[in-house]
Amino acid sequence: MRTYSLRIYGRPRPKRRPRKGKGGNFYTPRETKEWEAAVLAAWVEKFGPDPIFPPDCPLAIGMWFYFSDRRVPDLSNLQKAIEDALCSKDLPFNVIGDDKRIVLSVAVRHPDPVPKEEEGVEIIVVPFYKAQAFAAWRALVQEGGA
């Protein structure tokens, strides 16, 4: 089973709630769009724009977040930003396709501050086959942040 691992440097940004703009239209805040685009660009730079996973393959995803201070965003919003970046229909590439394919999602925030230049997120994505469920879980837990 192949593990796809990616480390992105820079302060991770949480998924912000849509805002109501002029004329009553809703929009995604600029900071969220920029972070999701940066995550997707890093993935495409490392693995290319073509789909890696078969369309019917369930997936497991792990995220390990690093911050240089104790002022950290909500973990579930950090997780959502990464998942949406890899599943976005608004960006030029769609790595995962439908986010319903994610059957296991693990997010961990490193408990201690790291040096500023080490802020970022490590993302691990693996195919999640029923026969390999335990191995996928172990890979996410053991390799995340290793």
Image (spheres, rainbow, N blue to C red):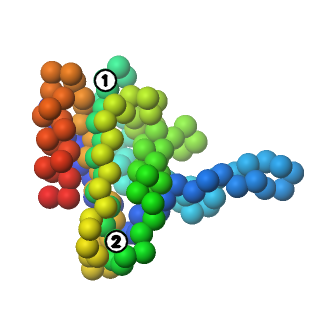
Which quadrant of the figure contains the C terminus?
bottom left
Going by the numbered disc 2, the residue's amino acid type is Phe
- Dot 1: element: loop
- Dot 2: element: loop
Question: Counting residues from the N terminus, which is met first, the one under dot 2 or under dot 1?
Answer: 1
Q: Nearer the viewer, mark 2 or mark 1?
A: 2
Q: Name the residue beneath numbered marker 2.
A: 67
Which residue is at 18% across, 48% downward?
Answer: 141
Q: Picture coordinates of residue 118 (x, y %)? A: 28, 73
The answer to whether 108 is drawn above or below residue 1 in the figure is below
Which quadrant of the figure contains the N terminus?
top left
Q: Quadrant of residue 122?
A: bottom left
Which residue is at 33% across, 41% downward?
Answer: 105
Q: Is residue 65 left or right of residue 90?
A: left
The answer to whether 130 is drawn above or below residue 92 in the figure is above
Q: Picture coordinates of residue 78 (x, y %)? A: 43, 56
Instruction: Confirm or deny contact between disc 2 and disc 1 (CB under 8 A).
Output: no
Q: Which of 36/73 is in front?
A: 73
The answer to whether 68 is drawn above or below residue 41 in the figure is below
Numbered circles on residues, count: 2
Q: Picture coordinates of residue 77 (x, y %)? A: 47, 54
Q: Name the residue beneath numbered marker 1.
A: 57
